[in-house]
Image (cartoon, rainbow, N blue to C red):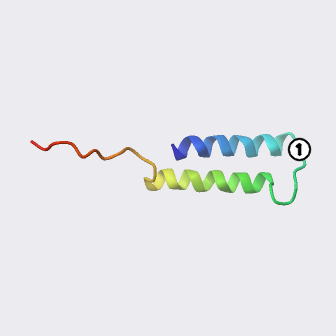
Amino acid sequence: MPAVVAAVLLFIAFLINAADISTNDVFTSTDVMLLGLVALSLHLAGVGGARVGRGRRR
C-alpha cells in the first residue's frame, strides 16, 4: 500500500512541477516529492506489507 501512495504523491509532484503551478509556501512540489519518497522508503522497509495470520498450526 505505501508503494501506491508513493506513486500517487510522486505523480502529483511531477504534475505540479511540469505544469509550473504556483502553490503557497507550505505546499510545494518538493514537499510532495519528499512525502512520496518517505512512503516509498516505508514500503521498502516492509511497513504496510502482508498480514501475518494467526491460523491453526498442524
Q: Position of residue 45 (x, y in %)?
A: 45, 56
Q: How many marks?
A: 1
Looking at this view, is 51 or 33 the one in front?
Answer: 51
Outermost bottom residue: 25
Residue drawn 86% across and 60% down?
A: 25
Q: Quadrant of residue 58?
A: top left
Q: Position of residue 40 (x, y in %)?
A: 56, 51
Looking at this view, is 1 or 33 the one in front?
Answer: 1
Residue drawn 43% across and 53% down?
A: 46
Looking at this view, is 47 or 37 the one in front?
Answer: 47
Residue drawn 45% across and 49% down?
A: 48
Q: Position of residue 3 (x, y in %)?
A: 54, 44
3 with respect to 55 (left or right): right
Looking at this view, is 29 or 48 the one in front?
Answer: 48
Q: Residues within 10 Å of mark 1 (few under 14, many from 20)?
A: few
**Residue that mark 1 sits on:** 20
Q: Position of residue 14 (x, y in %)?
A: 75, 43
53 with respect to 50 (left or right): left
Q: Quadrant of residue 50?
A: top left
- The amino acid type, in three-letter code, at marker 1 is Asp
Residue drawn 90% across and 48% down?
A: 22
58 with respect to 46 (left or right): left
Q: Secondary structure at mark 1?
A: loop
58 with respect to 32 (left or right): left
